[in-house]
Structure formats: C-alpha cells, structure tokens
Image (cartoon, rainbow, N blue to C red):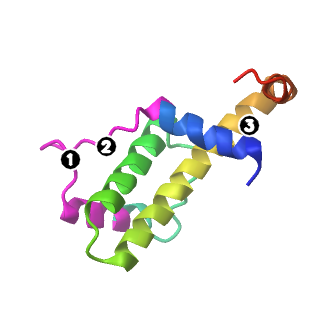
Amino acid sequence: MSKLQRLFITLVFLAGGLSAAQTKDGTPTLEQCRTDYKLWTVPNLSVAKKEWSIEILNSRAQEMLYCEMTYRADPAERLQWVTLENQFSSSISIRYMHFLDRHGLSDLFLDEDAKGQR
C-alpha cells in the first residue's frame, strides 16, 4: 500500500469522526451486524457502487468496524466484517484519489507532504 493510499484511509476515518454507526437504539446489535453484512454482500452488489454517497459508504464502514470490535465470539464472522469494512474504506479512498487527480492536486499534495507539510 502506497503512502498516499495510507493517508487517504486515515483521512476517511478522521472525516467520519470514528463514531459507530447509529441504529434506532444507538448502536447496532449482533443481529443487525449479521443482517447488514448479508444485505451489503448480496451477489452483484458492488461495494464501490457509484450511486452510494461517501456518507453511506462511511456509515457502513463504521458499522462493520463497530461490529468487528464489539462482537468477538466468532473469529470467522469478525474477519468477514473487517473485510467488508476495508472494502468500503477502499472505495472511499479511491474516490479521494480520483478527486485529487481530477483537480490536478496529486502532485501538489505529494510535494507538500515531501516537505513535511502534514
């Protein structure tokens, strides 16, 4: 993973505030984690769907991260949740990179970072 990709992943979490996804009672239950995982991994349902906003991708990534960190009984299930969270986060990072490229900011970013402007 490049330095630029690691930075974007960090930005994603900072922008999202690292708060857990909220449900009606405040936090997702174990059953909600399982249901949402199944819903979000239906065949032919790409995690990088362009119709999904950054807010939706971030919310789903946060929920899967919350599930992985909270419900630790089943290691295989935890791995599924963290894998899906990583897919959502990667989709967000790619969008950030595309934004920088579209606006000609990639070189500026790299130059400033090399100079220690962080």
Q: Quadrant of the C terminus?
A: top right
**Residue 16: x percent and y percent?**
44, 34
Q: Quick one: which residue is furthest to the left in this view?
A: 25
Image point 12% across, 44% down: which residue?
A: 25
| Front label number (2 vs 3) | 2
Q: Quadrant of residue 32?
A: bottom left
Q: Give how far apart the Cα atoms at labels 1 and 2 are.
A: 7 Å
At numbered mark 1, what does the secondary structure look like: helix, strand or loop?
A: loop
Q: Is residue 18 left or right of residue 35?
A: right
Query: Element at badge 2?
Result: loop
Q: What's the amino acid at mark 2?
A: Ala
The correct choice, above or below, for 49 with respect to 111 in the image is: below
Residue 47 visible in rendering: no
Q: CA distance from mark 3 to mark 1?
A: 32 Å
- Quick check: is 17 in the magenta stretch? yes
CB-based contact (under 8 Å), mark 1 and mark 2: yes
User: According to the image, label 2 marks what residue?
Assistant: 20
Residue on which the image places disc 1: 27
At 21% across and 64% down in the image, what residue appears?
30
Assign a secondary structure to mark 3.
helix
Which region shows up in magenta? 15-38
| Disc 1 residue type (three-letter) | Thr
Mark 3 or mark 1, whichever is nearer to me: 1
Which label belongs to residue 98?
Answer: 3
Q: Amino acid at mark 3?
A: His
Residue at 38% across, 56% down: 64
Badge 2: residue crowd in 10 Å (few <14, some 14–19, many ≥20): some
Q: Which one is earlier in the sequence, the residue at label 2 or at label 3?
A: 2
Residue at position x 60%, y 43% in the image: 9
Q: Splitting the image into 4 quarters, where does residue 107 fall? A: top right
